[in-house]
Image (spheres, grey):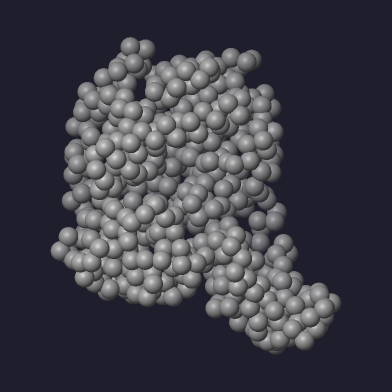
Amino acid sequence: MKITFLGHAGLFIETRHGSVLCDPWFNPAYFASWFPFPANDGLDRDRFRRPTYLFVSHLHQDHFDLAFLRDEVAKDAIVLLPDYPLGLLESALRELGFTRFVRTRNWEPVDLDGLRVTIHSLVAPTDGPLGDSSLIVDDGEHRILDQNDSRPVDLDRLAGLGPFDAHFLQFSGAIWFPFVYQYPAKMLEALGRKKRENQMTRALRYAQHLGATWVLPSAGPPCFLDDELFELNDFDRDPANTFPDQTVFLEYLRAAGLDNGRLVIPGSEITLERGRCEIRHPLPEREVEAIFTDKRGYLTRYRERKRPLIEACKASWPRGRVDVLEALREWFQPLLERADVTCAGINGVVVLDLGEEGVAIDFHRRRVDRWDGQEPDYYYRIDRALVEACILAHEEDWVNTIFLSCRFQARRRGAYNEYVYNFFKGLSMERLQYIEGYYAERAPVDQFWESHGYRIQRRCPHLKADLARFGRIEDGILTCTMHGWQFELATGRCLTSDDRRLYARPLDRPGAEGAEALQPSAAGATVRPQCGHCTYDLSRRSRGVAS
């Protein structure tokens, strides 16, 4: 097995059973804030433009490079699709022209003509943009784990899928905390130290528990080349900087007694053969070392190369093209009306300070109004152009655009509140209903509703839409109008798919089970064969390649 490291989380895996291209990233991300470190713009891309398989772990822009995937990757590549509840990743890839998919199930190995792959999918609202995943590739002789950004919890189960010859592991920051917060300098330093230590400790724990023969730091850190963000880079191994580089983590591993870590840079070729890990870098050893020992000089030269690109990106941001208040009021208020769990979780006012005006999102009153200047619970000062860009593109995930750009300042009352950021990554009714349902299932309050003589579970078995609001009942058939899935109340049977059931019990026979109580006719209802709106496809059950 030969693996070419493409930078950040990018891998090109070559086996005798085919090749796998994983998470390639080359173009600047998050409003031209993030760039791959070390630089990968000198790679010969022709070598990996036509992979047998393509794996994109999640939709964050440093893993889902829209321009590269659209313009440079062959569309006959077979996509290895994580088992996500929402079809957002598949839809995005289809829009780019990909048509062949292997739909995996969480934890379940899939045999692909001699190659065995297993994808572990994480589906909490806090995981990536509503989903993150890791990939195991086994060619019969070697087995590798590409963990990238994912943070699996069941480590015993993951270790049971090994042993692993190589483990590609994230160790560095990919977040805006704490440096965007308006805290005193000493507090920022203390928080930065804690964050840096926590993320490297977590990565060490994964490396120790999974016990791979070789550990290769990957999936970060990014570098910041815009003048406004340049000092965010960890030039001098600052223990309060949340973006330590690969050499820092390798030293951390050695200090903990692990000497199996290996450095790779874009273009490094890793050959696994007979228990050995041979790494050939694209540069002489002294030039590789200089990237890290003279990082400021390296990044200064990198910045000058990319300055025209950054300036062009910033010049393209829209200004004065949108009535922001009215646009957000029209967009957000219908979401707030349906966001019972989220509104209760935030329980306050979020302000977007755009300079000349501010917008207050009131989760008490479920209103979007002009900010009156009063101190809010959560405050964000953001360049108006970034908000206008998200409105014009109708970006449904502002975490994956504005917040990860680090181009904002923030303050808050009290501790971190995940509901705030989950709201901003769930800016469509489909996304929001999934988030609402996920939390509602884990804090069971009002989990049932009553209608047409039945006590019915409140959340749709498909994607957790609130059936008390989105359910319509006709002739014993409940239709979830969010996605068009239908269920027979008397039996709980799903008429759209064969692997979901709805809990429903007749109110007039409290001791009867729904499956035997009544058998109403479905003749008066139009029964749909599949989901009417989202990308859920009944061929998921076949788990084969769709062409």
Q: Nearer the viewer, residue 444 or 91?
A: 444
Give the percent coordinates (x, y) of residue 284.
35, 12
Name the image quarter holding residue 238: top left
Query: Is residue 111 in view from this perspective?
Result: yes
Quick check: 434 left or right of 449? left
Query: Is residue 388 in view from this perspective?
Result: no
Q: Residue at x 23, y 36 (%)?
A: 230
- Work out which residue is located at the far left of the displayed protein and give it: 356
Q: Nearer the viewer, residue 105 or 153?
A: 153
Give the percent coordinates (x, y) of residue 327.
29, 71
Q: Residue at x 55, y 77 (%)?
A: 470
Q: Quadrant of the N terminus?
A: top right
Give the percent coordinates (x, y) of residue 96.
44, 52
Where 186 sits versus 325, above or below? above
Name the image quarter holding residue 271: top right
Q: Nearer the viewer, residue 452 or 263?
A: 452
Give the percent coordinates (x, y) of residue 421.
40, 56
Where 141 sits versus 472, above or below? above
Where 123 sits versus 303, above or below? below
Q: Residue at x 47, y 48 (%)?
A: 128
Q: Residue at x 64, y 15 (%)?
A: 274
Give the tally of numbered discs: 0
Name the image quarter holding residue 481: bottom right
Where 231 sits versus 213, above or below? below
